[in-house]
Structures are given as C-alpha cells and as structure tokens.
Image (cartoon, rainbow, N blue to C red):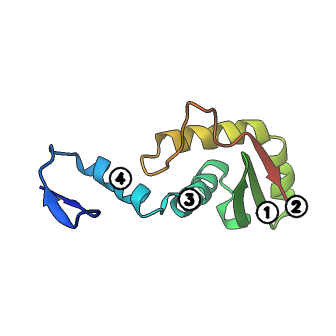
C-alpha cells in the first residue's frame, strides 16, 4: 500500500526499496536544491582538507565558489584547482543523496577560490 497525495487515498503498489523512497520524498518535497548545497559543502571540506579555513561554499551554473580565510591555504589550493574539481565530482557521484543528472556532464566544471 502507498499513499496517493492527489486522491488522498491508499493505493496498491509494488514494493519499493527504502533508498528509492527517500529519493522520491526529497524530489516531491523539493528539498533537492538545499540538500545538494549542503552535500557539496561537506564534500568540499572532505576533499580539499580546508574545511576549517573555508568560510563559505556556493554553487552557480557549474562553478563552485569557495571563500577561504587563509591566503596561504588559498594559494596552495589554487595550484590544485582542476584536480579538486574532479575529486569533488567523483565524491558527489558516489553520494546517494546528491541528485544530479550525470549524463549532462560533471556537476562542478570549474572552481573559484576567493
């Protein structure tokens, strides 16, 4: 049995795995944009190792903007921008809660350090 929100009734349905139900719930409640933003910030901290020096992480049109409060760390990360963008994409691809159409291409196309 599954709940049909349109007719406000229960309806018969095939068994669905819990991970698929969670993804469906995230899509229906329109939580995917906010959840993606949070997952991206967490992945950035893990991949870069500069989580404690990162003030802000934002994403817009394929560009990941990271505000770093240490000029030394920012300069160190600058020389690894391409590798970091690739590592972030790989980590996000493995993340089950991150929703992105990977057939369109990578999520993070470039990285801007501020």
The x and y percentages for residue 66 are 76, 58
**Viewer-nearest of labels 2 and 1?**
1
Residue 68: mark? 1
Q: Are marks 3 and 1 in contact (CB under 8 Å)?
A: no
SS for dot 2: helix
Out of 112 and 83, give the one closest to the viewer.
Answer: 112
SS for dot 3: helix
Q: Are marks 2 and 1 in contact (CB under 8 Å)?
A: yes
Out of 50 and 35, give the one closest to the viewer.
Answer: 35
Residue drawn at 59 percent across, 54 percent down: 40
> Which is more N-terminal, label 4 or label 1?
4
SS for dot 4: helix
> Which is more N-terminal, label 4 or label 3?
4
Q: Name the residue carrying label 3.
A: 33
The x and y percentages for residue 87 are 63, 39
Q: Name the residue carrying label 4.
A: 24
The image quadrant that residue 26 belongs to is bottom left
Q: Name the residue carrying label 2.
A: 71
């Amino acid at each position: 049995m599954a709940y049909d929100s349109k007719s406000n009734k229960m309806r018969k349905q095939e068994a669905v795995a819990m991970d698929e139900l969670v993804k469906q719930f995230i899509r229906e409640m329109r939580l995917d944009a906010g959840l993606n933003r949070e997952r991206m910030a967490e992945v950035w901290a893990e991949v870069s190792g500069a989580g404690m020096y990162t003030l802000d992480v934002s994403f817009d049109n394929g560009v990941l903007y990271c505000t770093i409060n240490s000029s030394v760390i920012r300069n160190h990360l600058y020389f690894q921008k391409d590798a970091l963008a690739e590592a972030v994409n790989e980590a996000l691809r493995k993340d089950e809660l991150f929703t992105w159409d990977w057939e369109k291409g990578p999520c993070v196309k470039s990285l801007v350090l501020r």
